[in-house]
Image: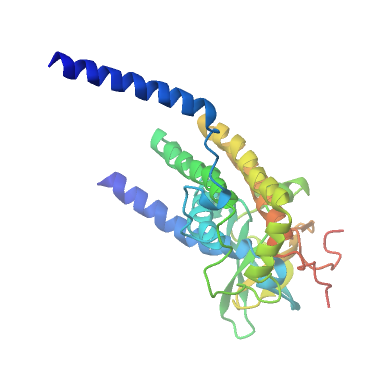
Amino acid sequence: MMKTKIIVVLLAAGALWSVRSAQAHHPFAAEYDVNKPLTLTGTLARMEWVNPHGWIYMDVKQPDGTVRQWTVETSAPGQMSRRGLKKNDFVDGMPLVIKGYQSRKDPTLANGRTLVLADGRSFYIGAVGGPNDGADR
Amino acid sequence: MQTFRHRHAAAAVALMVASLLTGCAAPAPEAPPPGDAPYRPVASIREVMNSVIDPSIDIVWNSVATIIDDGRMTDRAPATDEDWAEVRRHALIVSEAANLLLMPSRPVAPPGTGALAPGIELEPEEIRALIDKNRDGWNFYVQQLQDAMAPALAAIEAKDSQALFDIGEKIDTTCENCHQVFWFPNAVAPPAR
């Protein structure tokens, strides 16, 4: 019985993941709006260092004082590692600044382009196929 | 009774001789034309991707990860023989499902459906034309997926979670390369405004 429960939980988790994966398999232009660039300033709520794309969840304080949680898609962990960003650089609650582009459909989903850590280090976190905005140079 | 046996034996010999003679004269049976292949595709390529490949490759990808949450960093990897067997099942599904994509008679999308991202993704008939025009290229990209899955299967066999994690990016690259050629050839990186 326990085994069945574990498999059911895994399958359910897989089903949730597959929604985001399907997004990740669309080109940038299908999912994100190049006319909606944004800068998110907030704190790290959760980081998923996973293939094929990482996911950063960050809490962003709104002008009215409420907090909105954003989900930011990144490139593959291997690509970020090759640019010097490691999973050990992420600590729950750390301040972050992310530049990217908003989703066409989801008002709290973004495609990340650059990430600036509290110590001032800046990293390109965009996946292949994003806008030619110079973020990768 | 004996006469009946003799007649029976004579008939059998005559049949054998006749068979040998006609066997020598008749051409070898021809292979069935491609249209008469014994398999019968039920799903479209889109449905095979969404129902077979995507859910399984997600389980392979998500089996190894690091999660930073609740003040701690947690590495996720298959731990038991059962966990590894489960991941292997899904890696095999992806590897073998690639063969489903190679069947030439499989439609691109369900009848009457259009592009999922109109203007960015090609319409099914345009994708069909690209595949038919470049069948070797299509086969090449599909086999690239199988090639990328081989080290994943080896990593699973060796229960090497780091190797499985490392190959994850390569698998995605092979997916993206094929999508770029056949599904989104016009989706160039947009200029920033």
Give the residue drawn at x 56%, y 59%. Answer: B45
Specify the quadrant of the image occupied by residue B116. bottom right
Give the image location of residue B53, x and y in percent.
53, 53
Give the image location of residue A22, x and y in percent.
57, 63
B66 or B161, which is in the foreground? B161
**Image position of A127 with respect to A84: above or below:** below
Give the image location of residue A18, x and y in percent.
51, 60
Specify the quadrant of the image occupied by residue B112. bottom right
**Image position of B28 with respect to B43: above or below:** above
**Image position of B91 with respect to B12: above or below:** below
Camera sees residue B158: no
B52 or B189, which is in the foreground? B52
Give the image location of residue A37, x and y in percent.
75, 76
B87 or B48, which is in the foreground? B48
Horizontal side, residue B170 vs residue B43: left or right? right
Give the residue drawn at x 69%, y 65%. Answer: A27
Specify the quadrant of the image occupied by residue A73. bottom right
Horizontal side, residue B153 vs residue A4: left or right? right
Which quarter of the rendering shows the C terminus of chain B?
bottom right
Q: How is the image coloured?
A: rainbow
Horizontal side, residue B92 vs residue B17: left or right? right
A27 or B126, which is in the foreground? B126
